[in-house]
């Protein structure tokens, strides 16, 4: 096992690269906001490249840590037994090297951007590392994951204009509410397993119906933060299509997830719903921030 070679497919499965689509659009939208707020702001190609690489490094690190730290639980959970480490396709040592290596790359890139990003990088790195442990002690784990994504737009905007940008916090809060709300629904799949093994997820603590209601509240707050962003920034009014479309997507998502409450066996596979809605909300936010900047004035 120590000589196990890590294939490209195993690396992708270990780091869940496809889930980069949940957060990267929010980061890019955060980088665009200063262009609407400060006419002299410039977003160079190198800045875009650094931001994309920084987010990918952070995401790779977070997922590798998650699968490394949870490997013993994953081996006992029928839903996750096929993951790279429990299935023997990757070793804990390989995951450890990837996790710490990517986290080091993330901090290095932040040091190359500016002082603000370098100052916030240790906080982001700490949250990335501790997130996987939190499920063992407290239900706040869902919101820590959201907070990691909150920092994305904030750090991206700071990377462009060298200081913190207030409206980027609203975009970050929208990301937090969207990601946390989706993560709560995703955790419903494991609520029986979590209860049995004394893991602290919201569904395991409060049950399915209460968890879905909290997820709905968070998604409603995501729409509210997008609305506030449109009101306090000089983005073109076309941006208001973002909260409108987001509300429709959230309504559709929760309508399709609702049968989970009535089906104790959780026969409905929520992963495709989770992936599509998470990705769509992020890309809608990016698209209409971009259009709001291009059509401004």
Image: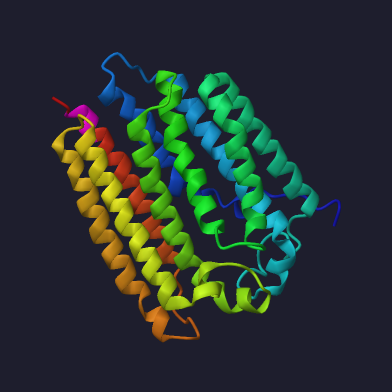
**Towards the viewer: 67 or 213:** 213
Which quadrant is home to the C terminus? Answer: top left
Q: How is the image coloured?
A: rainbow
**Looking at the picture, does residue 42 appear above or below residue 96?**
above
**Quadrant of res 172:** top left
User: Magenta stretch mostly in which secondary structure?
Assistant: helix
Q: Is residue 108 left or right of residue 229?
A: right
Q: Residue at x 68, y 75 (%)?
A: 197
Whether residue 10 can be seen here: no
**Towards the viewer: 165 or 65:** 165
Q: Is residue 218 magenta?
A: no
Task: Tell me which segment is drawn in magenta.
Answer: 291-295
Q: Residue at x 33, y 25 (%)?
A: 34
Q: Residue at x 44, y 30 (%)?
A: 156
**Quadrant of res 201:** bottom right
Which quadrant is home to the N terminus? Answer: bottom right
């Amino acid at each position: 096992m120590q000589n196990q070679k890590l294939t490209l497919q195993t690396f992708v499965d270990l780091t869940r690269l496809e889930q980069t689509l949940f957060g990267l659009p929010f980061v890019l939208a955060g980088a665009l906001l200063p262009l609407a707020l400060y006419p002299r702001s410039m977003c160079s190609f190198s800045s875009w490249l650094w931001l994309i690489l920084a987010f990918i490094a952070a995401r790779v690190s977070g997922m590798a840590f998650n699968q490394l730290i949870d490997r013993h639980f994953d081996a006992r959970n029928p839903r996750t037994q096929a993951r790279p480490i429990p299935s023997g396709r990757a070793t804990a040592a390989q995951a450890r090297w990837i996790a710490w290596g990517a986290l080091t790359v993330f901090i290095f890139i932040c040091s190359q951007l500016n002082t603000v990003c370098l100052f916030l990088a240790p906080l982001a790195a700490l949250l990335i590392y501790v997130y996987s442990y939190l499920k063992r002690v407290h239900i706040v784990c869902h919101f820590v994951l959201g907070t990691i994504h909150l920092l994305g737009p904030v750090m991206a905007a700071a990377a462009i204009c060298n200081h913190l940008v207030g409206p980027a916090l609203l975009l970050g809060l929208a990301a937090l509410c969207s990601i946390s709300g989706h993560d709560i629904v995703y955790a419903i799949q494991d609520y029986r397993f979590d209860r049995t093994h004394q893991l602290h997820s919201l569904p395991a603590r409060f049950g399915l119906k209460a968890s879905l209601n909290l997820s709905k509240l968070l998604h409603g707050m995501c729409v509210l933060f997008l609305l506030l962003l449109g009101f306090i920034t000089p983005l073109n009014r076309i941006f208001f299509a973002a909260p409108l479309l987001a509300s429709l997507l959230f309504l559709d998502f929760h309508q399709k997830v609702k049968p989970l409450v009535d089906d104790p066996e959780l026969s409905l596979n929520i992963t495709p719903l989770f992936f599509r809605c998470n990705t769509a909300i992020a890309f809608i936010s990016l698209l209409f921030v971009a259009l709001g900047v291009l059509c401004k004035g």
